[in-house]
Image: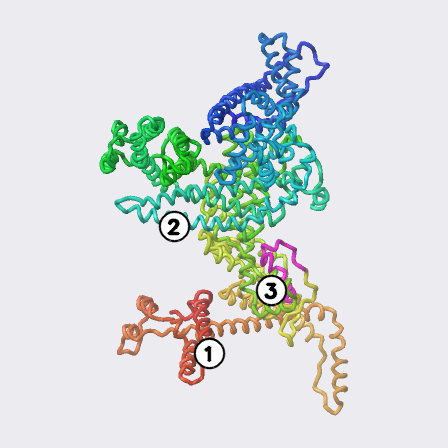
Amino acid sequence: READYYISTLYTYRSYSKPLPMIPAELDDKEKPKLYKTVFDIITPHINKIKGLIEFHDRLVKAFVKNLRLLIVPLEKREPLDVDLVRTLIRVVDKFFVLNLLKDMKGQTKNDFARYKRAFQFIRNILSNSGELMAQITEVHNFLNDPSHPNNVVLHQLKMDVGAVPHREQLFAVLVNQCMEDVRAHAYVTSDEKHVLYRCILASLYLADDAGSGINVFKSGSKYFKHISKIREMVRRLPVLPVFMDVHTTVPIALLMCDNFTKEMATGNAWSARKHTTTYDLKVWRTTIQEHYISFSTSFVIFLHDVRAHRKNPAGIDVAIAARGLELVVRGLKLLGDWTAKLREQIAFKCANPASESDYVTQGGRGGKYAVYEQITRFNYRSDLKFAMVEIIGLIKGLSNLMLSAESKIRPILCAYVHSLVQQFVHKSLAAPLQRAHKKKGKFDELEKLMVAARLFVADNANAQSLLVDYKVKKEKELSKTLSQSLQHVQSRAVFPTRTQCLLLRRILHYLVSPDVSWQQSGLLGSNFFPKAEVREFSELYEVLGRLRYVADLSGTIAASADLSSLWYREFYLNMTDCIQFPIAMSLPWMLTDYAMQTPSLAPNVFFPLSIYNDCAERALGTFRQQHLYDEIEAEVNLVFDQLMFTLYRKIFDYYKNKASKILLDKTFQSKLRRGLGSRLGQQMSLPLARYTCIFKQKHVAILGRSIDVESLLTEQLNAFIRDNIEVLIQRYDAATITSAMEIAHLLRTLRLTVEMLQQELPGIDAFDDVLTEVNEDSTLGSFRGRLFLTTYNGLFSSLLRNYIFNQLTRRFVCLERPRGNKKIDSLYLWGSRFTQVFQQRFKVTRGFFGCEHVEAVVELMGVDSMPLLVDETVKTVAHIIIRDISPYVDEILKNLDPMKLQNAYYGVLGVYGYYDMMLKYIKSYPALREGCFTLLREAGNALALVQMLDVVLSKESYYNHQIQAFYRCCEPAVMPSHCLEQMRFNNNKDIAVQDILYSSAAKEMHQIDANNTPFTGILKETLSQMAQTNKAWTQEKTLLKSCIVAAMKRERFLTNNSGGGVFSA
């Protein structure tokens, strides 16, 4: 823990003297000591941390040497070594390695110490303990700025102290061999444990290699490093090695510390980046990781089902199930550790191989002090690699959440299983070896003492004295009887053995059955004391006890295995570039989150990159204990989450808007577009795979200790955006001409379908009609008509009737002026990003005229109930024009018109025409006639033409509602039931009294619809039955008719829900 504290202190150390202003030289001498004293007091606590590091380093070296010497005696006697002690030494060597790199990395410590030393020189006369401080300053100076060893001073001092230990080369060879064995056997669990083994190999080679003592570990003839080629081959598999957070090293650079490792060895082709790209490339490992995830999650869920099924069994959980559960838990922890290790190794590889200068400039890099980190992160990850990283992060967090959620269910089972296993071993399995050792008195006394000590130390038995005598019986039957009685005193507990019990029992077990002990070396003709069955049983328990430290702290182990905080921390590069902090665009978690938002197929994983910030915050407060780091993380999370929600709801809305547009686009027109414009448009019109349902099911997200209701936020944002969309459409309609009615009606229809599909996923989305009424300002009692009605009304009477000419041949109004274009707006407000261009081209041809299609849109926008008002206003307009505007012209014309009579046909056509032309010459030249009267006549004619077109459209719609729908829906005009009609008759059945109560009850019996028995489906079913009676197969024809029947039934349901549902009711 203390080593981790100083590692964290060094890593998070930032310059405290840099923000302090320099003291000007021209300042008064009386004021300088006060300022220097202030500077001294500010920097002193941080220099004290460096002093603490020096003291801890000395203590750690002494402790390491002391424990290393414990291996000398068993090594000389060729006795089995304590594997747990060796692994502890491996971890300590790794701490030295990490401390050494961090100490050399942090230049701020030297800067702060220089400022501290300078301030001390000015105030040493006013300090009471200046002599003591001077000695401490000298010590810190030698540690930070040792001229003989400016680098690697931590490992160098360790090497100097270890040099006096006998068998140094052999001891470090033991550490290296143990590391290699653990790597091959996958004895590690967390990702950090894997990298500890590799780092320990490098550090041990440095500590063992000594040119002064004539030890060359890289020489093939070395006594204890005979297999140096295997060691070299293993470390070559991982040439770029993560060290701590964003700190990394390479194997050649780390080995250059050694005396006998030359630069020629470091520049070989074996360390080239291209050769090891596939080792680090997550795109290569993605499929394998997915297969492992599916396999493990399936087995784990089956195990949970078995636990739930056996929990009701009075006998308890089966031992085989509990054993399988322990194996599954350990396997899951190792999978998490492997995946996290692959992720960290990929990032370390990218840090060691940044983007080239040409790629950096090509992708938009602008240089500056951020350029180094920008080449490592922002411009160094391609889209396919980001895709793989997001998926793997999702698998890591998904598996960790699966195991954490099941911890409370499986922990008691695993505790009871391990407790039972250990007690069965010490009470029963150890009894037979104890009996054999007791029979051969004197020869195996040491062995008997060891096994008795193991029983007493671990046994959970109220009668401890029985453990000393139960195995001393002579016969096997008596032993079995004694053991059965002894086992009755053992209580079943759901507890794990303590850490001390596990270590001691493992040490004894390893010593008992090791092939190096005397009682296991009987030669060819003899036999070992422990037979193979007992050796196998001892070894299995040894392995189980070795895993307990991970299983006992399951939540902690899962957190350590799935810790992804190294993806955000960048203290090494902040120190390198002398920056306070990097922009958010260079943050790797933000890059992954942004890519997940932009990729619809990654929608289920969009929240997983945010869990990186949870790991970072936990590390900042729990491990580093630095508030400023947490504040930086929190500030970035605020920006990231706001941007995430903004982008997310827009992407969701755009997806469903595209989906609605594709549904409403005519399928024949769509297929012709694809054939005519090629595959490019077809690819654009095809919707991507977007699994937004997973996001809608995500009710809450935990970020930095806060539980955020994602569903509520999405609902709130989408409701606001739907209102904004309607507002934009109405404003677009206000600024356009009446010919845009078709476009606006279709946009509202598309938006309505979009909202309906969103309501199926988010029930909190407001109903479209309510939102439209609200934005249309048609929701209050005082509102006579909404904005859409008023805009359409003004467009008809102010623009259409006055500025358009009706063409009787085409039955269309043609504008006298060139139509103005619409203002460009975001495609999200129109038909979506994929279909806006298609629909704009489609409706572009409808802006130059006004026909029956536009009248249908006007009816849709204004509502059928407003048509009587529209017709009434149109008739009033015609009457107003004729009576008030045209009648004065008629009176004036009649006053000035000369009397005329019908001429004789004898003059011919030209003669008669010439006569009237001469008589009307002065009236024809009247200037106000063309400008005033004819314009008014055109306006009146347009009004009459509009009424005629309204009649055509309304007749068509009435025909659709009353004839076509009736045929498909089996609707008939409402008829009063006969028994209700009889109750209303009076006066000898001559008159009928209208009674509201009877009408309301009779309405319940009218308008009965049966989708399965409509006339259309009846005709099809009858045809199908007649075809079945013939001798021909009619396979394709029957299939066609069946599909038509199913489509007709679905069409009826659609018509019932979307139009004219109450037309035929009472």
Q: Nearer the viewer, mark 2 or mark 1?
A: 2
The quarter of the picture where residue 527 lies is: top left
As shown in the figure, which amino acid type bears the numbered disc 1?
Thr
Q: Nearer the viewer, mark 2 or mark 3?
A: 2
Along the polypeptide, which appears first: circle 1 or circle 3? 3
**Residue 879 seen in the figure:** no
Q: Dot 2 corresponds to which residue?
A: 302
- The circle drawn on residue 962 is none
**Residue 418 image point, x, y percent:** 35, 38
Number of disc labels: 3
Q: How far is mark 2 from mark 1, CA to CA?
A: 46 Å
Along the polypeptide, which appears first: circle 2 or circle 3? 2
Compared to 677, does 68 lie above or below? Answer: above
- The circle drawn on residue 1035 is 1
- The circle drawn on residue 796 is 3
Disc 1 secondary structure class:
helix
**Residue 376 image point, x, y percent:** 64, 40
The quarter of the picture where residue 144 lies is: top right
Q: Residue, x 61% and y 61% (percent of image)?
A: 683
Disc 2 secondary structure class:
helix
Q: Residue, x 42% and y 85% (percent of image)?
A: 1030
Compared to 236, does 665 lie above or below? Answer: below
**Residue 212 seen in the figure:** yes
Compared to 521, does 973 lie above or below? Answer: below
Q: Residues within 10 Å of mark 3 (few under 14, many from 20)?
A: many
Start and end of the magenta stretch?
A: 821-846
Residue 974 is a magenta residue: no
Name the foreground residue: 545 vs 392.
545
